[in-house]
């Protein structure tokens, strides 16, 4: 009788508000991220180093570009690159958690799976913001990146919000790749996407690589983020590119997420 009563009480337990989503959950995920020194180095330190190496070159750093100079252009590119790696890393961390059995343990708790994913996305955006701020700080301290304040703000916000696409990409790959070394696999992929997005050097739109680049995930975000500085014509294809890839990656993550949670 007691066992039956306890079982009934268990099933009648009220569902936690917001699926157990809370600031504590976000803090926990953030601490897990900060403990990974490799992730911190590649998302914060490396983009700053790349800016210092390429953005301060005296032979071209002060050359005019749109409403600023080349140093500002490179700063924006490296900020986006850091945000891309940061958000992808956070999303892809689910692969490690799955291999260690952490995800399975969470599915046995009142935590709603969607709340878990929401926490991941919030932490991904926080990590992306830190990466962008770090590169921007380097640009301010060195006094080399010059562009209007409005361009600083607009480019940073566009790069930050747009990096959500790569958070979805990371989640998709995290659920798709059963590997503890998922970022070692994705590292070269992200480097290639950065190249095709024009973050490392300008691409000729009429070249073969330029034509291929238009259909890659970074192309639209790079165009949108650089536009406040370059002040050229706005191309709706940039926005379409970002939204399309966000939908594709989010749909892929949702598909793999449902298959993963169905196992319990």
Image (cartoon, rainbow, N blue to C red):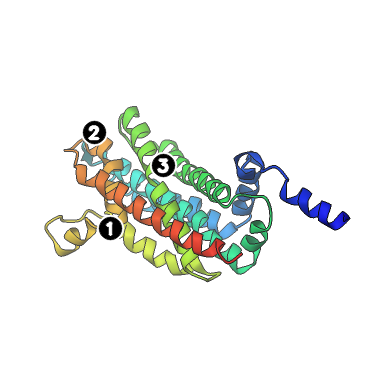
**Can see residue 58?**
no
- Return the residue found at the far front: 1
Q: Secondary structure at mark 1?
A: loop
Work out how far the residue at label 2 is from the one at label 3, CA to CA, in angstroms: 21 Å
**Can see residue 66?**
yes
| Marking on residue 160 | 3
The residue that disc 2 covers is 67
Work out how far the residue at label 1 is from the one at label 2, CA to CA, in angstroms: 27 Å
Label 2 vs 3, first from the N-terminus: 2
- Return the residue found at the far top: 149
Image position, residue 228 (x, y; %): 27, 35
The reply, left or right, for residue 29 in relation to residue 160 is right
The residue that disc 1 covers is 216
Image position, residue 138 (x, y; %): 44, 42
Q: Secondary structure at mark 2?
A: loop
- 247 or 87: nearer the eye? 247
Quarter of the figure with residue 249:
bottom left
Image position, residue 151 (x, y; %): 31, 32
The reply, left or right, for residue 240 in relation to residue 145 is left
- 177 or 66: nearer the eye? 177
From the image, which quarter does the C terminus lie in?
A: bottom right
Label 1 vs 3, first from the N-terminus: 3
Residue sitting at x 40%, y 40%? 139
Work out how far the residue at label 1 is from the one at label 3, CA to CA, in angstroms: 18 Å
Q: Are marks 2 and 3 in contact (CB under 8 Å)?
A: no
Image position, residue 167 (x, y; %): 45, 52
Q: Are marks 1 and 3 in contact (CB under 8 Å)?
A: no
């Amino acid at each position: 009788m007691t066992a039956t009563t306890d079982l009934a009480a268990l099933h009648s337990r009220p569902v936690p508000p917001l699926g157990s989503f809370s600031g504590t959950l976000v803090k926990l995920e953030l601490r897990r991220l900060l403990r990974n020194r490799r992730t911190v180095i590649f998302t914060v330190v490396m983009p700053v180093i790349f800016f210092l190496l390429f953005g301060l070159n005296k032979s071209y750093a002060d050359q005019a570009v749109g409403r600023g100079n080349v140093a500002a252009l490179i700063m924006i590119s490296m900020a986006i690159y850091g945000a891309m790696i940061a958000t992808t890393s956070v999303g892809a961390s689910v692969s490690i958690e799955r291999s260690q059995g952490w995800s399975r343990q969470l599915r046995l708790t009142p935590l709603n799976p969607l709340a878990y994913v929401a926490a991941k996305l919030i932490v991904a955006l926080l990590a992306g913001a830190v990466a962008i701020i770090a590169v921007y700080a380097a640009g301010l301290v060195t006094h080399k990146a010059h562009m209007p304040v409005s361009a600083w703000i607009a480019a940073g916000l566009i790069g930050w919000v747009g990096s959500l696409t790569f958070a979805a990409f990371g989640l998709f790959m995290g659920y798709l790749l059963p590997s503890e070394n998922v970022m070692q696999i994705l590292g070269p992929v992200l480097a290639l996407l950065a190249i095709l997005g024009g973050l490392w050097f300008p691409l000729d739109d009429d070249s073969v690589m330029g034509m291929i680049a238009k259909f890659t995930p970074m192309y639209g975000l790079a165009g949108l983020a650089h536009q406040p500085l370059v002040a050229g014509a706005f191309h709706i294809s940039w926005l379409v590119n970002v939204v399309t890839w966000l939908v594709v990656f989010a749909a892929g993550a949702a598909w793999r997420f449902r298959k993963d949670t169905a196992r319990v």
